[in-house]
């Protein structure tokens, strides 16, 4: 079991805020965000599915390029309730960085 620190980029926080303002079920959204944060704290490197740079949809690659300035070798994607969470893990740093959240609907 590897405990990790989870950080949310300002852009990911802005994604959640925008979804929250447009949501008809804010409780479900809050619960999904809280669950994502909790799950990623333990063995975050094993959560979700790995997506390699060539597998990401074009829109996601462009968004990543704008937000991070680079495309990581592996981005992990986790689906929880109404959201998809895009994140990266650094095992040596014991760090999970959430850089994008989007609605699955």
Image (spheres, grey):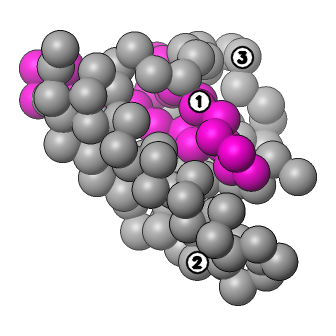
Q: Is residue 71 left or right of residue 98?
A: right
Residue sitting at 74 percent across and 51 percent down? 82
Rendering coords of residue 105 (x, y %): 88, 52
CA–CA distance between discs 2 and 1? 19 Å
The foreground one among 55 and 100 is: 100
Residue bearing mark 1: 77
Q: Are marks 2 and 1 in contact (CB under 8 Å)?
A: no
Question: From the image, which quarter does the N terminus lie in?
Answer: top left
Residue sitting at 26 percent across and 28 percent down? 42
Q: 90 above or below 101?
A: above
Rendering coords of residue 53 (x, y %): 60, 20
Residue bearing mark 3: 55
Residue farthest right in this picture: 105
Callout 1 environment at 10 Å: few (<14), some (14 to 19), or many (20+)? Answer: some
Q: Are marks 2 and 3 in contact (CB under 8 Å)?
A: no
Residue sitting at 70 percent across and 85 percent down? 21
Rendering coords of residue 84 (x, y %): 66, 43
Of tags 1 and 3, the one toward the viewer is 1
Say how many tags the image has: 3
Can residue 101 be spotted in the picture? yes
In magenta segment, residue 1: no
Please tell me whether mark 2 sits on a helix, a strand or a loop: helix
Rendering coords of residue 103 (x, y %): 76, 55
Earlier along the polypeptide chain: callout 1 or callout 3? 3
Please tell me whether mark 1 sits on a helix, a strand or a loop: strand
């Amino acid at each position: 079991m590897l405990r990790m620190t989870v950080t949310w980029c300002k852009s990911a926080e802005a994604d959640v805020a925008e979804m929250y303002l447009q949501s008809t079920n804010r409780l479900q959204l809050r619960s999904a965000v809280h669950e994502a944060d909790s799950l990623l704290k333990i063995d975050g490197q094993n959560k979700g599915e790995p997506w390699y740079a060539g597998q990401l949809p074009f829109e996601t690659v462009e968004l990543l390029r704008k937000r991070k300035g680079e495309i990581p070798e592996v981005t992990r994607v986790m689906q929880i309730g109404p959201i998809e969470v895009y994140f990266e893990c650094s095992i040596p740093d014991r760090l999970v960085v959430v850089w994008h959240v989007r609605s699955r609907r």
